[in-house]
Amino acid sequence: MAKKARLIDATKCMGCKGCQVACKQWNQLPAVQTEFVGSYENPADMDPNTWGRVKFNEYENGDSINWYMNYFSCMHCTDAGCLNICPVDAIVRMENGAVRIDQETCIACGACRGACPFEIPRISDAAYKCTFCADRQAQNMAPACASACPTGAITFGDRDDMLAAAEARVSALQDRGKTNAQVYGKDELDGLMVIYVLADSPDKYGLPVDPQVSFSAYLWKLAMRPVRTVATVGLAVGALSSWFTLRKAEVEKEKEEAKL
């Protein structure tokens, strides 16, 4: 299967948040209570129930303001720090290049977020992030965010095709005087499954200029491999203990009912 990619042309983004809402709706993620904190970004950050959001970045340019907006979620990196560091192998790579978290295996240790250069996974009872709409792709449908975008700022297809489209778009922008226009995601972390067309440097969009996975992430996984067995045993003991507690309560309830 060819690797898939989401192409985000930030020069076409108008900040409508249709992508953000579509992600919520398709994945049946509950709403989050928010309040205005001085920015159009809403919510102010991602959480276990918000897997993607539109970033609003503004910079003064003389007497005017330049807006740099883009949809931000998991990048599905080829060199994925989250996958490299997970001590229980709850994070796997799919054939299409997507990085997926198995919430049933995840122990919510949070190591994945610490190892991610983009600080993507959010932790509660497990780690959560963009799934690349694996269920939609299985039905030959584009991710919800791409399907909802009204300006064509988000498109989806084979990675090679998306990369070629990104490079052609950047060339056209440069010909029109956007000398700082560039492709982001072609080579970063050995290639991202989310490719951006940017009008300026990545930091203007809140993206790391040179994302890197710390070497300590690889050392951590080697050191934590023995923990996998311990964690598995611990989870099994915990589950068994919970079952005994529940069964004891059921027995007591049965005895009380028998007395009636």
Image (cartoon, grey):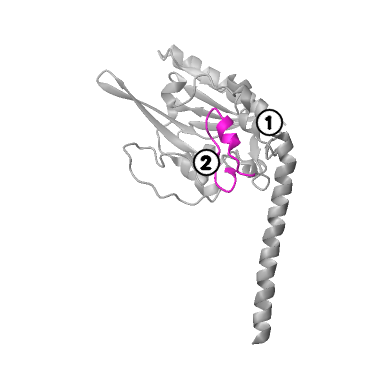
What residue is drawn where x is 51% and y is 29%? 8
What residue is drawn where x is 70% and y is 62%? 243
Q: Residues within 10 Å of mark 1 (few under 14, many from 20)?
A: some
Residue 111 is inside the magenta segment: yes
Where is residue 150 shown, x and y percent of the image?
Answer: 46, 37
Q: What's drawn in magenta, residue-wise?
A: 107-127
Q: Which part of the image, by quadrant, shows the N terminus?
A: top right
Main SS of the magenta part reads: loop
- Mark 2 / mark 1, whichever is N-terminal: 2
Q: Decide which of 120, 67 is in the foreground and name it.
A: 120
Q: Decide which of 216, 81 is in the foreground and name it.
A: 216
Judged from the image, the secondary structure of the residue bearing numbered disc 1 is helix
Tell whether 198 sits left or right of 214.
left
In the picture of the structure, the residue carrying the numbered disc 1 is 221
- Whether residue 146 is visible, yes or no, is yes
What's under tag 1, amino acid-wise?
Answer: Lys
Q: Is residue 255 above or below residue 241?
A: below
The residue lying furthest to the left in this view is 63
In the picture of the structure, the residue carrying the numbered disc 2 is 51
Rounded to the nearest angstrom, the CA distance separating label 2 from label 1 is: 25 Å
What residue is drawn where x is 34% and y is 36%? 39
Residue 57 is inside the magenta segment: no
